[in-house]
Image (tube, rainbow, N blue to C red):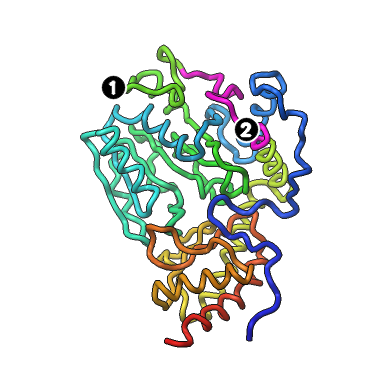
Amino acid sequence: MKPTLKPKCPNFSSGPCAKRPGYSLASLPSDILGRSHRSSLGKARLAKSITETKRILGIPADYHVGILPASDTGAFELAMWNLLGARPVDIFTWESFGEGWATDIVKQLKLADVRHIKGGYGELPDLSQWNPKNDVVFTWNGTTSGVKVPDGGWIPADREGLTLCDATSAVFAMELPWEKLDVVTYSWQKVLGGEAAHGMLVLSPRAVQRLKEYKPAWPLPKIFRIAKGGELMTEIFEGSTINTPSMIANEDYLDALAWADSIGGLQGLIKRSNDNLAVFERFVAKTLWISFLAKEAASRSNTSVCFSLDATPEQVKALTKLLDKEGVAYDIGSYKDAPPGLRFWCGATVEASDLEAVLPWLEWAYAEVTKAA
């Protein structure tokens, strides 16, 4: 039978992600609109985003946090172009975005001393292959594969190289061992459901020291420069952005941070994501035709949850179109480079009740698209 109860919010995209429950654009302050980001008011609001980020995430006091242009992509590119080249590089990849970083390191930066260690979709590569004398580049959570790094136990405290981590679909939903991470990037559009086009860069004291001691052999455009004369441009990490940011997007981020505080901070956010994953874990356990793309439970993402179906690629596409047409699940197809399947965002802004409501629709749609087979 065709279900009747629909999710209140059918937005399950993995980016931009669903807005927080109860969100209203009208509730955002408007006094900053039309004001300069260089004004005392503008810099104060941007600085608040930085200090609140550090507080809620528990980032060490001696780490630097800055707001950058071009989303997580811009932040991670900036980090690679500023920091890589001083040491050999090990790259771990197991999905599309990590592969993109590997391509840029080899083909754009043209670094010669590089080891690329791959895992297939659904599998984590052997992280113990990292040589701690080398820099290492990796995603914490594979947004397009649903496979995450379980913990930081493989990163030694006495490492010589830097750890560069793209954590855009992990931060605010998973425990990150900040003392093991030298460079972390993410965007507002993921776990907190913020707006796109701005990236966040977190630097450890070890990363700052690298910036002071190492000058890349290649030129850096203005939008990538965070060091000058052998010193970190600290104003970037105090609210003075490299270029003009969207002040309304910044207010949107502050609204999301305040909501995070209201539900218990980081631990509240993690619990909501874990509870959302649990909805699907129960469903997969009793449903024969669907399985997690991530083969090991310990490395299974609680945000970008990816599935394989006992169906042809054409049937999977038909299923996603059917659920979209019914208005019960938008943007749930797997990433274009990933194996055919489904991907549901389960970050903290998604309600478990909406995931529960979509399950009967999944069963109905699967039966509809496979009944003629």
The image position of residue 54, as x and y in percent, is 61, 35
Left or right: 229 in relation to 242: left
Residue 233 is one of the magenta-drawn residues: yes
Q: Secondary structure at mark 2?
A: loop
Q: Amino acid at mark 1?
A: Ala
Q: Which is more N-terminal, label 2 or label 1?
A: 1
Q: Residue furthest front?
A: 325
- Which amino acid type is shown beneath numbered disc 2? Ser
Q: Which residue is mark 1?
A: 217
Determine which quarter of the picture holds residue 331: bottom right
Q: Residue at x 68, y 42 (%)?
A: 257
Q: Nearer the viewer, residue 354 or 330?
A: 330
| Measured Cα–Cα span from mark 1 to mark 2 | 32 Å
Decide whether residue 240 is among the magenta residues: yes
What is the crowding at mark 2: few (fewer than 14 residues within 10 Å), some, or many (at least 20)? some
Residue ID for mark 2: 246
Magenta-highlighted residues:
232-250
Q: Nearer the viewer, residue 72 or 222?
A: 222
Q: Residues within 10 Å of mark 1 (few under 14, many from 20)?
A: few
Given residues 253 and 230, the one toward you in this image is 253
Query: Splitting the image into 4 quarters, where does residue 327 fall?
Result: bottom right
Question: Which of the two discs, 1 and 2, sits closer to the camera?
Answer: 2
Q: Can residue 299 be seen in the rendering of this structure?
A: no
Position in image of residue 75 (x %, y %) = 47, 35
Is any atom of residue 356 visible in this view? yes
